[in-house]
Amino acid sequence: MEEEDDGFLTGLEHIKSVETDDGNIEIESDNYFIQPFISKDLTNTEWDRFIKNVKSLVRSSVEYKKFISYLKDCEEMGICTFFSDITDEDASIEVHHTPLTIHDIIEIITDHLIIKNGGTTSLLVCHEVLKAHMLGLVGTVSLSETVHQLVHAGRINININQIHGNIKEFLTKYKDGVNDEHLNKIKLMIEISKLPAHEDGLFERKKYSSNDILDCNLSFDSIQTALLEASIEASKKRMTDEDT
């Protein structure tokens, strides 16, 4: 999906922040509903509540449901990534966010908007999160319900070449909001993806944690390079599969 500079508006573009004489920030707008801006000076409880609220807004939105339908109908994600003979007609096929969870994505975009604008709102974050999804910047895989449960239980490793979405571009676009915890998740997936498949089969329990790779010295640039190489490898595999 291609970005449209002028076609993705929410009405919140009319909101203006004005600094008062005493140094406070007031929000002004003409005939628009206004949410108070939030910044990073929230308690952990308030921050978690904000992220969960945005997650609820995203997942319950019409746009998100259209995104899921688009993946299944147009991006061949109506089948299970691990069992290609299981389709939407046989079982529930679910979209799994990886290596960054939807919580991570919302957190990164929230921090990005706070740094960029000095504050943000749940509606603005929701809008940007949906935009990142629609532009194909979010990493996802399609899994049958049972396999999805096994992934969350840590019994299946997802290879970085199996991911749909331009994670490299996401990291570039929202770089200011990315922290070490987010990068370590990506480092872990990159390192695990280099390992040979377990001889004991698909459901071998995962024996790796982020602590295994904290000293692997992967820089932000090298992560970008690895993601680009993975994207190229995945494209080659798709072309080969189409030819056979």
Image: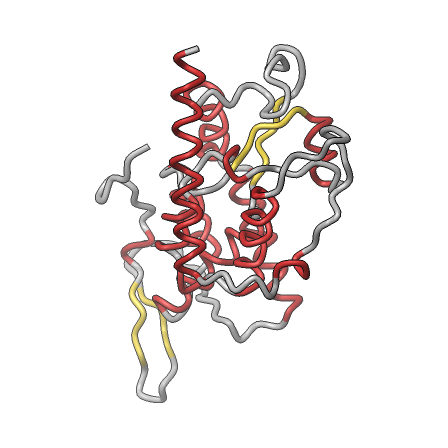
Viewer-proximal residue among 73 and 156 = 156
Residue drawn at the location 61% of the way across and 64% of the way down: 214
Left or right for 80, reference 28: right
Image height check: is 42 above or below 224? below
Q: Number of labelled discs? A: 0
Residue drawn at the location 57% of the way across and 62% of the way down: 216
Res 206 quadrant in image: top right
What colour scheme was applied to this rendering of the protein?
secondary structure
Residue 49 in the image: state x and y as whole percent.
63, 59
Residue drawn at the location 58% of the way across and 49% of the way down: 191
Quarter of the image with the N terminus in it: top left
Viewer-proximal residue among 142 and 110 = 142
Viewer-proximal residue among 206 and 6 = 206
Quarter of the image with the C terminus in it: top left
Residue 127 in the image: state x and y as whole percent.
41, 47
Seen as rendered, the residue at the extreme bottom is: 22
Residue 10 in the image: state x and y as whole percent.
34, 46
Left or right for 134, reference 163: left
Image height check: is 77 above or below 52? above
Residue drawn at the location 66% of the way across and 11% of the way down: 90
Residue 132 in the image: state x and y as whole percent.
40, 44
